[in-house]
Image (spheres, rainbow, N blue to C red):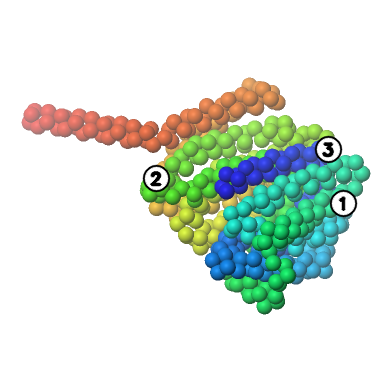
Amino acid sequence: MAIVLMAGALASKLLGFAREILMAQIIGVSLVGDAFRGAITSVLLPVSFLQNESVPAILIPMHKNAQRRGVAREFLTSIAAALALLSLMPTIAVLAYGEFWVDAIVGGLSEEGRDLALRFMKVMTLAMPAAVVASCLAGGELASGVSRLTNIRASLMNVSLILSLFVTAATGRVEALAWGFAAAFNLLAFWGVWRLSREGMLDIGGLAPAKVAAAGGEFLWRLRPLIAFPFAEQGNLWVERLLASRIEAGAISSLDYARTLSDSALLLISQPVGLAFLASTGVEDKSARIEAHFRPLLAIMAPASVFLCIFAPDIVQLVFHRGAFSQAGVNMTSQALFGISAGLWASTLGWVLLRALNSENRNALATLIVVSAYSANALWNLAASYLPAWGLTALGFGEAMRGLVLLAGTALALPNRRKLFMLLIVAVAPACLMAYLGWRVRLEFDGGLPRLFAGGAAYVLCALFALAILRPQTENAARKLGQSLDRLVTAIRRRQTLRGSARK
């Protein structure tokens, strides 16, 4: 299942990358993009606690317990109905107080932008109950050893938005984006209900109010220790959206375009490696297992973050600069990518170390660390709002701050913390080498593919250097060399002492 989930994540990432490139070409860095992304936040934030990543951690054990008691069908049907009913309350609230909610999310946009976000939001509210139901059914599938809904969810969303972008380009009606968003979630939910009913995993006819209330109450009770996680995550996103909307039109879109490039490390490295760590059940020392994952990741990501910081404008120019994506959009997205990349290495390593805490069942501490990281991000963004000259770079640094707090917290919580911090110090050398070589490349090449190719060659060299010096064998050799030098120095001092005694 881990391999299938990784394949699904890769497929959705490729589709998401294609979607963002197409959106950059058709919409660009514009008020429409800001309003659309702000509307997405406005409808997903109120139901985040019903479909966040912490939900499967509760729903899957509950479903497995129901399987052992022989009531899995009744349980999954009841919990899906309960969560659907719970999602109706925030849905109605968003519709009733739409103007106030839009102002709270993207109040810095112009009046035209806020009106457009409100139009998007009214259509997208149709997706709120469907998103919750789909997430619930996906958790039930995972508990039964199936991952169809989990795998196709993001891919279906990306395909739907890609089709909506074509409709927008052909007709000029931007509302197609909102309808595509709502259609994707509802199609997924209806297909999930139909498919699971046919396979005997749901019992629609057996719904009973008492069972629905009991399942919903137990779910909410179990959710209590983890409730801080979705609110911290979405609250931080709320603060970021609000502050970005006050910078200039296109700032929200620029941040998301930058994340299209930076999130690849988290999706394609952190998650698979974290799953591999959780799946490994050997009897070897846990500290050794942690270091075995930590060393190569650090060697890859330390110079990679420096590479992205130095060549951010060239990468954004190559990937996005076409169609409606203007040079101003290149500049804004480059600023955001520069700030985010400064802490990308820390975020990647921090999420992997977080899985080490999960593997030891230290989930409460893991939640506290994640909440602290998001809180640090939000506080940094609020403080940076008083530095308008920094613009999107400041908000990017906020995400870097989150990564640093996450890495520091998880590393300090592990027993081999001293070794991990020593490895971080060693990794400074290849990172500095990458900074020097990147600076030289920027001086020698004017831009475009030749500069990126030369910078990529410099990165490969620095990554190989990092892998060499971070290997345990290199560390052992350095330790033996140090011990030999200590013995040599001791012998020389002893000889000098003997000579002095002989003279006397």
Residue for badge 1: 175
2 vs 3, front mark: 2
- Give whichever of discs 3 and 1 has the lower sequence position: 1
Type of amino acid at the residue the image marks with label 2 = Ala
- 488 or 366: nearer the eye? 366
Which residue is disc 3 drawn over?
324
* Helix, strand or loop under label 1: helix
Which of the 4 image quadrants contains residue 228? bottom right
Specify whether residue 42 is in view.
no
Q: Position of residue 106 (x, y in %)?
A: 77, 56
Q: Which residue is mark 2?
A: 288
How crowded is the residue under tag 2: few (<14 C-alpha within 10 Å), some, or many (20+)? few
Image location of residue 180, percent across then percent down: 82, 51
Task: Please give the name of the residue rendered at 84% of the width and 58% of the height, measured from the top-left corner.
Answer: 123
Give the total of numbered labels.
3
Report the Cα–Cα distance between label 2 and label 1.
Answer: 53 Å
Which quarter of the rendering shows the C terminus? top left
Question: Disc 3 versus disc 1: distance between alpha carbons?
Answer: 18 Å
Label 1 packing within 10 angstroms: few (<14), some (14-19), many (20+): some
Q: Tell whether 486 sits left or right of 314.
A: left
- Residue 208 rendering spot, x and y as whole percentages: 70, 75
- Whole-angstrom CA distance, mark 2 to mark 3, is 50 Å
- Identify the residue at horizontal 79%, vertical 43% (top origin): 162
